[in-house]
Image: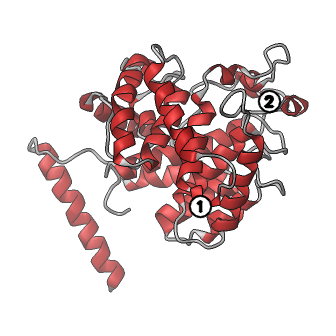
Amino acid sequence: MIEMQKMIVLRRNQSEIEKQNSEGGSLLRMLRARHFEQAEQTIVTYGRPLEIAWFNHYFNEQSQEHVVLELSKYQNDDGGFGHGLESDFRAPISSPMATSVGLRHLNELSGIDATKPMIEAAIHYLENTYDTSRNGWFAVSKDSNDFPHAFWWHYDETENMTMIDRNWGNPSAEIIAYLYKYREYTARLDTERLVEDAIQYMNRKPLFNSENEIYCFIRLFDVVPEAWRMRLESGLIDAVGQVIDYEEERWHEYVPTPLNFMCAKTNNRFGINERKLDAHLHFVMDELERHGKILPPWGKTYYETDLNQAYPEWIGVLTLKALLSLRRFDRLEPSR
């Protein structure tokens, strides 16, 4: 009886959506349930247990403990994260970059006692790997070269860094965000000074050419108090405006698209054109309706040898990310 009532409500909701859309109403286009189910099957087929656990938490009311269990498999005894958590470098050893990704996951979990020792250990690892000469962190060490990795993660011993490290904020700005948020676990680093240094870097830098660096600063923006946000906001608006790609025909490529900058929990749009943001939501729905998945826009070329495991992992990661974006903007059919 309950199931029948639910079906009646769902049909009524969909009927109202179709009626208002046909009359030029203001209700937004949503991803239909059958396309959602295709995306779900993609995540089950291609995704790692970590992405499957996240999907089940967000959409199937599974507890966060399953996510914690899967995430814990990527953490090492030194507190850092590795083991291919960032799929494009497979080093099992810890790195600041992989640890920033681990804390990004932990930051989404709440009220779980099991995360506290994981966070504390990760913070201690980051304190131990802080580089005073850089006033921050390098993404990976040269030891990562001993394991499969995409070329952008190759540690150049002439430069003593990867090409990623040419932009200080990636991952240092994001790491500082977590050091500040979890500052009760810090023992040696002055988190307020680090935040201040990051803000000054952002406001002094005249030209941004790395969207990934900007994502890191948006995550910093997300956790600091309002006074610091006010000082970051204008710089972020300018930085986003410098790199964002509004050309819809290019969104199949690896370009910084509008939704990619929606990585903060706040509703700040950082100057992004609302019409283009809506168009990008439609683009994501089109991709899921046509293919049932989101393919890595940077292509499969880099994954034909010892990195072949990474490509399907990215399909799972990106498809889950797409569903979560649609969920955030209320673009999933009411059955979900």
Where residue 219 sits: x, y (%)?
Answer: 49, 42
Looking at the rendered structure, the kind of residue marked 2 is His
Dot 1 lies on which element? helix
Q: Mark 1 points at which residue?
A: 184
Residue furthest toward the right? 146
Q: Residue at x 52, y 33 (%)?
A: 198
User: Which one is earlier in the sequence, the residue at label 2 or at label 1?
Assistant: 2
Q: Residues within 10 Å of mark 1 (few under 14, many from 20)?
A: few
- Mark 2 or 1: in front is 1
Q: Which of 242 and 247 is in front in this view?
A: 242
Whether residue 9 is visible: yes
The circle on residue 149 is: 2
Where residue 247 sits: x, y (%)?
Answer: 37, 17
Image quadrant in which the C terminus is located: bottom left
Where residue 236 sits: x, y (%)?
Answer: 39, 29
203 vs 94, left or right, is left
